[in-house]
Image (cartoon, rainbow, N blue to C red):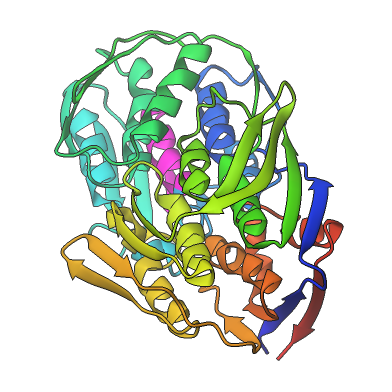
Amino acid sequence: MIQTVTLSHPTGVLHGTIQLPASKSEANRALIIAALAGGNSTIENLSEANDTQLLQRLLKSDAETIDAEDAGTVMRFLTAYYAVTGQQKTLTGTERMCQRPIKILVEALRELGATIDYLQEEGYPPLKIKGFKGNGSNKLKVRSDISSQYISALLMIAPLLPDGLELELEGKIGSRPYIEMTLSLMEHFGVSATFEDNSIVVPHQNYKTATFAVEPDWSAASYWYSIVALAKEAEITLPGLKEDSYQGDKAIVDIMNRLGVYTEFTASGITLSKKHCEKRVAFDFSHCPDLAQTVVALCAALGVTLEMTGLESLRIKETDRIQALQIEVLGMGTSLNEMTPGVFRMEPAILTKRELTFRSYQDHRMAMAFAPIALLETVQIQEPNVVRKSYPGFWQDLEKVGFSVINNAE
């Protein structure tokens, strides 16, 4: 039996203040660094997202077999963490997680001195982490067009390596703000590093105990931008977001400025309001891939011609996000096509007044990206509980601003 949620909004007029969940990107990095610093640091405003709660539990676990479930950061960060701390662990996850590649990270850790075996298919979890010799190389070359989580995992353990780490990133750097976020958090906990051109150098040093307050999640904010863009009238306040944020998904401010949402920064956060929307846009998502689903769904609903690049990492997320988007926008009367390698184009949708059903593909961002379309017509979202991964209170927050949210089963 498939769980669904039916969404509608009787007026399309929204006013309110929404307390966003804390950033799991910041929280998960802070948890790993705090553990490497000795475990006595204080992390404030920890995310309630399942990924963060899971990582917090697993870092305290003495179990030999560790289940990272469907959490990519948990799998990748713990692989590096267990390796450098010499812990013997079997690290596994959901069926989908065991289909997501991890070879680049494992090979890098082996070069550094870790002993890691694959228990099933070469290049994929589950993994057997057997220890760390500490006599490996301190210089690595890593492809930089892959998930930045591999690079962040290596950087966070770098200070503990006997000779530190010199990391050369080969090719176009994807998700650069996430790498910079990692380095900023490392600096907050007392570790210095240099990032020049495609080279990152982290000398051997010790983390220091510190207190860190996690900022609200800009990725979660993106859905509220979409809601404001589609509303007849709206003013939404999101407390706690900062203009000088570590988070790369702050890019949503500039993206949505072209798609009909004005952002006012205040001392306490941001306020969103409606403005003119462009009818033809092009965006490069290389540094903010998690925003792509929100923008695709919104542009389809707004009737905006969209061109996108920088989507390479979307193939290896919770689902193949490109394929999932291509399937779901068909039901809105449009198509997302790869015109040339890496360049995608979507023409305006032809919406008809009928109930639309969207599949979530066990992907939290698919569910939340298509939910705002309920401002135009009734929407059903399948497997709505997937939002627990990053934004557990999403459906309740929609109700606060007047959405009708009906849970049911098919």
Residue 109 point in image, percent of width and height:
26, 36
**Does 65 sit above or below residue 372?**
above
The residue at the point 70 percent across, 70 percent down is 375
**In what quadrant of the picture does the C terminus appear?**
bottom right
Residue 262 point in image, percent of width and height:
60, 41
**Does 340 sit above or below residue 392?**
below
- Magenta stretch: dominant secondary structure: helix
Quadrant of the rendered image containing residue 195 = top left
The residue at the point 53 percent across, 9 percent down is 208
Judge by depth and name the residue closer to the eye, 348 or 79: 348
Question: Left or right: 164 with respect to 126?
Answer: left
- Residue 174 magenta-highlighted: no
Residue 225 in view, yes or no: yes
Quadrant of the rendered image containing residue 156 = top left
**Does 317 sit above or below residue 201?**
below
Quadrant of the rendered image containing residue 100 = bottom left
- Residue 81 magenta-highlighted: yes
Residue 58 in view, yes or no: no
Boundaries of the magenta span? 73-91
Question: Left or right: 123 with respect to 181?
Answer: left
Question: Left or right: 285 with respect to 383?
Answer: left
Residue 169 point in image, percent of width and height:
19, 32
Judge by depth and name the residue closer to the eye, 115 or 235: 235
Judge by depth and name the residue closer to the eye, 125 or 142: 142
Q: How many labels does the image show?
A: 0
**In what quadrant of the picture does the N terminus appear?**
bottom right
> In the orientation shown, which residue stands out farthest toward the front?
276
